Amino acid sequence: MQNWEERPFEIAYNLNPAYCAVLLNASIAGYQENKKEGMPYPIIFLVLPLIVYKPIRNKLPSKNTSQDISLWLKENPEILIDFDRKVRELVPYTKEALIFAMRENVIELSRETGNFINQKTLKPKWEHSTLADCKQKAIVLGRWFSVFSIETIYTNFRIRP
């Protein structure tokens, strides 16, 4: 990973640790609403690839989390194109955001389960609609993922841990 000063402006702006931490925090909050437990480690790495890429984010369900992942992917097969590469590329940014969030006591790794849990819910006052949309989609994504097993999610997205 490049030093902060060496990162292109677009990457530094769109994938900065604080912003990504807010998205992870929102997704974990959505997951915890339904499941009453933290988000498993393998799932956390799918949040940013599904949220930061606008064409994918725009296809995510807006509220209905009862839709089956396999049906959704059949209706939107273009999402699977290079999805594994997108996940791999964003792993360092996810890790950086997790470290930032854990250092700020926003997210915690449960010693009992190894899942990520929220210490506090972040409520940034974003006026920009894209940022607010990303946070809302992250919440819905967390709720959606809480319905399925890790195996089901990874199998449908055609990726391996």
Image (cartoon, grey):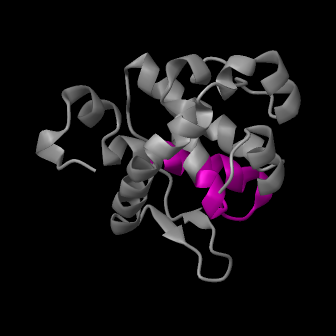
Could you tell me what secondary structure mostly forms the magenta stretch? helix
Q: Position of residue 159 (x, y in %)?
A: 69, 45
- Asked if residue 29 is among those painted magenta in the image, a careful observer would answer yes
Instruction: Work out which residue is located at the far left of the displayed protein and give it.
Output: 5
Q: What residue appears at the point 20 percent right and 31 percent down from the top-left corner?
A: 8
Residue 21 visible (yes or no): yes
Q: Is residue 72 above or below residue 121?
A: above
Q: Quadrant of residue 137?
A: top right
Instruction: Compare residues 52 and 87 and report the one nearer the observer.
Output: 87
Residue 63: image location, x then y, percent: 74, 27
Tell me which residue sits at (59%, 24%) in the image: 57
Left or right position of 108 against 146: left
Q: Nearer the viewer, residue 13 or 6?
A: 6
What percent of the width, then of the height, locates residue 135? 51, 34
Give the tally of numbered discs. 0
Q: Which residues are magenta?
A: 22-44
Residue 39: % across, % down: 66, 59
> Of 147 and 121, which appears nearest the observer?
147
Q: Is residue 149 visible?
A: no
